[in-house]
Amino acid sequence: MVISSWPPVAAKRKTRERLAWGLAAAGAIASLALLGFAITHAPRRAEPIQFFIATPRSITAIGTPKVSPDGRYVAFNAVDSAGVSRVWLRPFSSLSSEPIPGTENAQRPFWSPDSRYLAFMADGKLKKVAVTGGPPQTIGETGSRGDGSWGSAGVILFDSSSTDSIVKISAAGGIATAATKIDRARGETGNAWPQCLPDGRHFLYLGLSSRADSTALKLGDLGSTKTRVLMTGNLSRIEYVAPGYVLFVRDRALLAQPFDAGKLQLRGEPFPIVDDVAVGGGGAANAEFSASENGILVFRGSAGAGTSRLTWVDRSGKDIQVLGDPGTYSDQVASPDGRRIAVESGTGNPDIWTIESGRNVTTRFTFDAASDYWPVWSPDGGSIAYTSDQAGIYSIFLKPATGARPESLLSHVPVSIGPCDWSMDGSNIACLVQAGSNWDIWIQPTGGAKAYPLLSSPFRKHEPRFSPDGRWIAYSSNESGRREVYVQPFPGLGGKWQVSSQGGRDPEWRRDGREIFFLSLGGAMTAVDVAGTPGTTLELGPPRVLFPGVLSDDSPIGHNYSVSADAQRFLLRKPVREGELPATTVFMNWTSTFARR
């Protein structure tokens, strides 16, 4: 008997087919479900988010916000209502900003690559402080009050001043040495604003020129002083940010330029990110922005930023009279009779303007295309001396205060020179001359003789001021390791008296010579009584604070305030929105606003 096996095999095959189709259907359903899940749960492109961080009302002046590389903090230096300058820290996890203890007199902080430390300049030293707490540690000696960048290889770069080269120092401590060489052949006047690149060896910086539109973005190498120009134009300070952009400001617009960090070259064209960014002290190049490595951009808008009013205050700091319209003022100087004010105004190519106190009328004084700085009145109020680069080098020019005749060249020296004060007998102008990384005090006679050095040393001398009788000269110097005010005889050599005790700058004499005023390093107006036999000895009283919070910049030559003839009034620059300084804008996921270029 033969038994056929076909029907059972066919049945099994049909069973398998039904199973296969069932599995296929189930798979299709599962795939559709997964696709639907993927569509509804796919990671969305990060949306751009912007919000403000308000400036604490106790702050009267504030520096550029610096976001940490990991995007967890924002740091900035600021002066509080007591006149003390410190580094402040705002964690994004907190609702408030707080000053960091031990950072008094700090300037322009910058971050370590791992976001654990903030470095800053204070009292002639480069220091670092841990954000988690602890006292600051000194990295090295430096006279710089400029900007720095901390590289991944443990080297810190910083600029000493706008007329120096970039210097480098180990983050572990040591001696600073030159990292760049100023290219005089292409008309460079200095190097500034270094920015370390990810490889830890190369860096970007600006080659400054007397012509703003000739500023060069340059590539440097820690292993040599050879450099390469990447771009020229009217540039601000720059920052490199992942995934491959160089950020800078032009005409207050923040631009991003694609940059290949591997090939060390720019690509494509710059494109705008933010329309309105403030520029702070130090000129138009000092743009107030920074970016983290994870897509956080912080900046301060220009509305009200850097804008001030010229204001007469009494000896307690109380407002008496406001002059002119709000503007970007610096170096304001009252005429001997107090009726007119000469002031430097504008960014890029500033000019000198005058303001009549009685009528409150502002008149332009210089009209050339060059940069005009540091006005000084003659003792009779008939002329104004100032510095201009219209001849290709900063030189002193004289012009009648009425503007009735063109300016005439006074200085005939092959170095850049700027006027600081005019002696009461009209015979001499005290000047500053750049000497490497330092400043020396020179005297420019007004009778036609050549300028000559008065004080030359390895230290920085700032703001020379003649006493009313012409027998003394006051100035500030960092020879003790921090900036202090001194007085010594003029024109001969002799003893030297220290006027300030805990740091000081910007000395000014009372008209009768019985007081010396100066600013503490935190910006407090301070007075010292002067006694003794005129021209022979000095008896100085203890410094006493009159009022805090004077707005000032770090120019070694200009005037941050003026004193009336009776010493009862002081002419200051005051923020337009005092107590309501511009907020910091935080822009998260800023790269999501454009396609990768």
Image (tube, grey):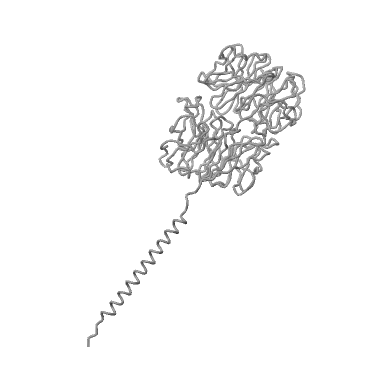
Q: Nearer the viewer, residue 168 or 209?
A: 209
Task: Identify which residue is drawn at 41% across, 37% down.
Answer: 268
Q: Height in image: 575 above or below 591?
A: above
How many marks are shown on the rendered structure?
A: 0
For residue 404, what is the image quadrant? top right
Which image quarter holds the N terminus? bottom left
Which image quarter holds the C terminus? top left
Whether residue 112 is visible: yes
Question: How far across and how far down the image is residue 566, in percent?
Answer: 75, 21
Q: Height in image: 548 above or below 383?
A: below
Q: Nearer the viewer, residue 151 or 311?
A: 311
Whether residue 463 is visible: no
Question: How far across and how far down the image is residue 427, in percent?
Answer: 65, 13
Check the image and name the residue furthest to the bottom: 1
Question: How far across and how far down the image is residue 164, in percent?
Answer: 53, 29
For residue 553, what is the image quadrant? top right
